[in-house]
């Protein structure tokens, strides 16, 4: 059975819209140990960070190189010449330690599946990416070290229950405020407009609604606009298929 081109175009538009919504999610930095993920809540690594100046994970071997790595999910630590860092690389061959990220530099990103914490060294040369994997039953954090994936770029994976978003409220969001303003204006428009039409124009029934002619034709206008957009998309698609 042939599927109408219009239906295919509609499905395509819906899929693209859904993908765009997912990819537009962000995790806004809340503090050096966590961020707020859109529509999900707060990811807070504070409970699993150490506060005694040592790393929670110290001298973990890499799966890619011969170096050892230390990392503290929340709070700074010092290891020999790595001072006040979040992540440190140790070269046992030369007893050399390299700052690969400080806590205050952290930014957060969302790749559509996991949140990533990105740390930059004090000199701005090295960067460590820690993929935060949510596992509600992993109360004891687990660190997997890939190591130096490319020059001056390092990769870890942290699996923990602390990487799961929890409900968090910062008060009314910008969207909520806009909705309140919109519905308040709409209510005022109908209330005062209706009173004017009743008192000044002597209107009754549905005619009491301000600009009733415009509002009654609005659904048709919206339908025509959607049909126009879909027609443009489908025409472009038919051109690509014929080529």
Image (tube, helix red, strand yellow):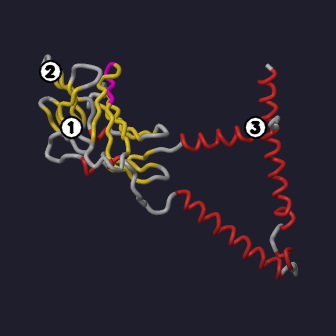
**98 and 213: which one is in front?**
98
Q: Nearer the viewer, residue 147 or 213?
A: 147
Q: CA distance from mark 1 to mark 3?
A: 51 Å
Q: Quadrant of residue 193?
A: bottom right
Could you tell me if the residues under marks 1 and 3 are in contact, i.e. CB atoms within 8 Å? no
Question: Which residue matches tag 2?
Answer: 92
Q: Going 33% across and 41% down the picture, which residue do you hit?
A: 159
- Image-based side of 140 in relation to 185, left or right: left
Disc 2/disc 3 C-alpha distance (Å):
60 Å
Residue visible at 26% across and 31% down in the picture: 122
Residue 67 higher or lower than 207, as above or below: above
The magenta-colored residue range is 151-155
The answer to whether 128 appears left or right of 5 in the picture is left
Do the CB atoms of the residues marked 2 and 3 lie less than 8 Å apart? no
Residue 8: numbered disc: 3
Indicate the secondary structure of the residue bearing disc 1: strand
Q: Quickly name the residue at label 1.
A: 57
On the image, the x and y values in percent for residue 17 come to 64, 42
Viewer-side label of 2, 3: 3
């Amino acid at each position: 059975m042939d599927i109408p081109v219009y239906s295919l175009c509609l499905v395509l538009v819906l899929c693209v819209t859904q993908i765009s919504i997912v990819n537009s999610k962000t995790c806004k930095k809340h503090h050096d140990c966590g961020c707020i993920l859109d529509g999900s809540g707060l990811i807070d690594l504070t409970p699993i960070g150490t506060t005694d100046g040592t790393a929670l994970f110290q001298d973990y071997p890499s799966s890619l190189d011969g170096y050892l790595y230390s990392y503290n999910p929340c709070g700074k630590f010092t290891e020999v010449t790595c001072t006040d860092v979040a992540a440190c690389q140790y070269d046992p061959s030369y007893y050399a330690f390299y700052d690969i990220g400080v806590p205050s530099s952290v930014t957060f990103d969302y790749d559509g599946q996991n949140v990533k914490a990105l740390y930059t060294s004090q000199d701005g040369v090295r960067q460590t990416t820690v993929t935060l994997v949510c596992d509600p039953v992993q109360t004891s954090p687990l660190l997997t070290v890939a190591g130096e994936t490319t020059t001056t770029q390092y990769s870890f994976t942290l699996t923990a229950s602390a990487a799961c978003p929890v409900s968090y409220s910062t008060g009314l969001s910008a969207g909520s405020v806009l909705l309140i303003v919109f519905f308040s204006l709409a209510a005022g428009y109908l209330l005062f407009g209706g009173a004017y039409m009743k008192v000044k124009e002597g209107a009754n029934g549905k005619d009491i609604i301000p600009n009733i002619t415009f509002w009654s034709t609005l659904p048709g206008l919206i339908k025509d606009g959607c049909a126009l957009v879909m027609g443009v998309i489908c025409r472009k698609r038919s051109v690509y298929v014929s080529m």
